[in-house]
Image (tube, coloured by chain):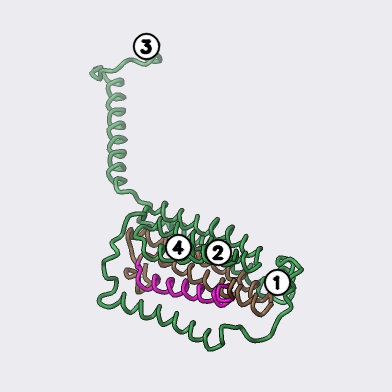
């Protein structure tokens, strides 16, 4: 096996950066609030992957601990965000993110 | 070699799922693509010896969060196909988004390349011989105890706010139903007519004529 095909931690970092960029792109071009939320989840997961990779690189548990906390924050964010989306779409079916740009019900 | 194959398959699943989330015009397909990305990342966690995080990733993300997404999609009935060709915010939004995303990617890659693709800094005490869940639990309940406690407060806040937000607020004009005035008028009218008929019947009984056609009640039959 040549050394060029060895999976180094940098590969994981590049993959995390790629997923984060795709999530950013999706967040900027989509106007369906649910899909925008899924793009935020993509970005959070990319960051979690990066944290775990760094945790292995520097041999520290801090990276894994912060991933646990990011998971909790993501769950809380999804609960509140989906409640807002349900309240919004119940009032105005088919609303997009542009329709609530001034944060008024 | 095994690690390379695992990385290739899981990485492809991640990227394909991410592209699927962004590019699919149906919300349900986007949610299912998100599951692909989450599973890929869980596999990469296992490949990096973060077994506990991989299990939590599958249980919390794929098991709870995506199911919540699907519930909301089905509940609201927004699983229709959208037209993605519509330019969202006037001219150039899509091009600007591509430039921003490429910029983020380029920034991260440049930073990585400038470090020679290696992490530098303090080297911690992660021990390969101890299971990762033991070390993670010890770190969470000693060094990061305050952060851990604050996340519990955050969860309580999230639950309370979700209940508050999704409750239907009953306002005054929502309680009043549209036909109430007509029904009220009809009821008043019927009461008035019944009172008038009763008064008429009493008058007829006290007087001579029996011009109201009705069955005599048993008491009246006895009396007659």
State yes or no: discs 4 and 2 in contact (Cβ < 8 Å): no
In the rendered structure, the answer to whether residue B32 lies left or right of residue B205 reads right
Residue that carries the numbered disc 4 in the rendered image: B17
Mark 3 and mark 1 lie on one chain; the one further toward the N terminus is 1
Res B30 label: none
Which of these two is toward me, B28 or B119?
B119
CA gap, disc 4 and disc 2: 18 Å
Which of these two is toward me, B217 or A96?
A96
State yes or no: discs 3 and 1 in contact (Cβ < 8 Å): no
CA gap, disc 4 and disc 3: 88 Å
Q: Are marks 1 and 4 on the same chain?
A: yes
Nearer the viewer's eye, disc 1 or disc 4?
A: 4
Taking the spot 53% from the left edge, 84% from the top edge, the residue there is: B112
Residue B186 magenta-drawn? no
Residue that carries the numbered disc 1 in the rendered image: B140
Q: Can you tell which quarter of the image residue B125 is in?
A: bottom right
Nearer the viewer's eye, disc 3 or disc 1?
A: 1
- Please determine whether, in this image, residue A69 is positioned above or below residue B216: below
State yes or no: discs 1 and 4 in contact (Cβ < 8 Å): no
Chain for disc number 3: B
Visual hue assigned to chain B: green
Res B221 label: 3
Chain for disc number 2: B
> Which chain is brown in the rendering?
A
For residue B6, say whether it is visible: yes
Residue A20 magenta-drawn? yes
Q: Position of residue A67 (x, y in %)?
A: 60, 71
Mark 4 and mark 3 lie on one chain; the one further toward the N terminus is 4
Nearer the viewer's eye, disc 4 or disc 3?
A: 4
Within 10 Å of disc 1 (Cα), the crowding (few <14, some 14-19, many 20+) is many
Q: Secondary structure at mark 4?
A: helix
CA gap, disc 1 and disc 2: 33 Å
């Amino acid at each position: 096996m040549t050394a060029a095909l060895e999976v180094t931690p940098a590969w994981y970092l590049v993959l995390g950066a790629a997923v984060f960029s795709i999530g950013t792109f999706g967040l900027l071009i989509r106007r369906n609030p649910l899909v925008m939320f899924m793009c935020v989840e993509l970005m959070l997961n990319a960051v979690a992957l990066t944290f775990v990779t760094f945790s292995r690189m520097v041999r520290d548990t801090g990276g894994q601990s912060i991933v646990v906390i990011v998971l909790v924050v993501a769950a809380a964010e999804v609960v509140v965000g989906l409640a807002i989306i349900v309240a919004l779409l119940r009032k105005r079916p088919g609303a997009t993110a542009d329709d609530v740009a001034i944060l008024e019900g | 070699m095994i690690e390379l194959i695992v990385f290739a398959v899981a990485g492809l699943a991640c990227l394909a799922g991410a592209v699927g989330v962004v590019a699919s015009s149906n919300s349900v397909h986007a949610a299912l693509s998100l599951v692909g990305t989450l599973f890929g990342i869980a596999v990469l966690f296992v490949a990096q010896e973060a077994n506990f995080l991989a299990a939590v990733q599958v249980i919390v993300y794929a098991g709870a969060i995506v199911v919540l997404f699907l519930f909301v999609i089905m509940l609201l009935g927004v699983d229709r196909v959208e037209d993605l060709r519509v330019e969202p915010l006037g001219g150039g939004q899509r091009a600007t988004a591509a430039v921003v995303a490429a910029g983020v990617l380029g920034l991260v890659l440049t930073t990585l390349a400038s470090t020679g693709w290696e992490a530098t800094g303090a080297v911690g005490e992660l021990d390969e011989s101890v299971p990762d869940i033991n070390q993670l639990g010890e770190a969470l309940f000693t060094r990061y105890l305050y952060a851990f406690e604050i996340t519990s407060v955050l969860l309580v806040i999230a639950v309370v706010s979700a209940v508050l937000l999704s409750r239907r607020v009953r306002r005054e004009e929502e309680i009043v139903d549209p036909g109430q005035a007509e029904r009220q008028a009809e009821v008043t009218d019927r009461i008035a007519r019944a009172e008038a008929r009763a008064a008429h019947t009493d008058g007829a009984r006290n007087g001579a004529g029996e011009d109201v056609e009705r069955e005599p009640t048993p008491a009246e039959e006895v009396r007659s």
